[in-house]
Amino acid sequence: RPVIGVLALQGDVREHLTALAALGAEPVAIRRPAELAAVSGVVLPGGESTTIAKLADRSGLLEPLRAAVRGGLPAYGSCAGMILLADRILDAPPDQETIGGLDVTVRRNAFGRQVDSFESEVDLGLAGGPLHAVFIRAPWVEEAGDGVQVLGRVVGGDADGRIVAVRQGNLVATSFHPELTGDRRVHALFVDIVRAAPAQQAGLVAGTEED
Ligand code: GLN
């Protein structure tokens, strides 16, 4: 059973823990740097990215997370988690930090103030057809680098064609919240990535234990 951490500083942590457990992974909540050492993948939940980034900084997790992701630790970010994985962010406070790793520019709260939340079908090319996606004050990917695989786009409406799901190597991010719908296919994709990833980053992450 792959041990997968969920960054548990703020946001919908419990829903991710439940989804991972349902897929046969062993989910653990991560609140301190030492807890990162034990995981072979990490989920960054939905919530408020400004708050999560601040808390991660204060709890000494920001640098270890950056080092772990740089070292190849698989990571999946939903919504606020997508913002945290982005190398570049727009419409964020100037001092907002990210973990980075994904060569994308992400715009926060991109869908506009009047549509705080909405639901839509998004085709990720997964077996079983399009996925029912829940967007809550969601970001979108405004620009993706050459190495980034676009997994899904919005179809129809004002945001037609906007990128809402991406993958780059062991990193996956979605603008929406599959943890809220009971459709486990995105988490299953991530668990497969974790299972296939070499354990080579464990030593690197373990180095943070002395902090
Ligand atoms: N708007 C939030 C942010 O910028 C993300 C919302 C969410 O995760 N549902 O972090």
Image (cartoon, rainbow, N blue to C red):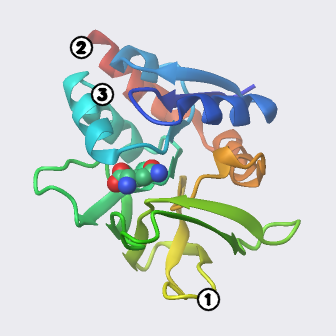
Label 3–label 1 contact, CB within 8 A: no
Q: Earlier in the sequence, mark 2 or mark 1?
A: 1
* Left or right: where 182 falls relative to 163: right
| Residue, disc 3 | 61
| Residue, disc 1 | 156
Q: Which of marks 3 and 1 is nearer the N terminus?
A: 3
Q: Is the residue at mark 3 in contact range of ligand 1, meaning its CB lies under 8 Å from it?
A: no
Q: Where is residue 122 in the image (x, y as percent from the top left)?
A: 68, 73
* Of marks 3 and 2, the one in the foreground: 3
Residue 211's tag is 2
**How far apart are the two marked residues, 3 and 1, measured between alpha carbons?**
39 Å
Is residue 85 something one can see in this rendering? no
* Left or right: where 62 falls relative to 166: left
Category of crowding for the residue at label 1, using alpha-carbon neighbours closer than 10 angstroms: few (below 14), some (14–19), many (at least 20): few
- Residue at 31 percent of width and 20 percent of height: 208
Is residue 137 something one can see in this rendering? yes
Q: Earlier in the sequence, mark 3 or mark 2?
A: 3
- Quarter of the picture containing the C terminus is top left
* Left or right: where 122 falls relative to 149: right
For residue 4, what is the image quadrant?
top right
Secondary structure beneath dot 3 equals loop
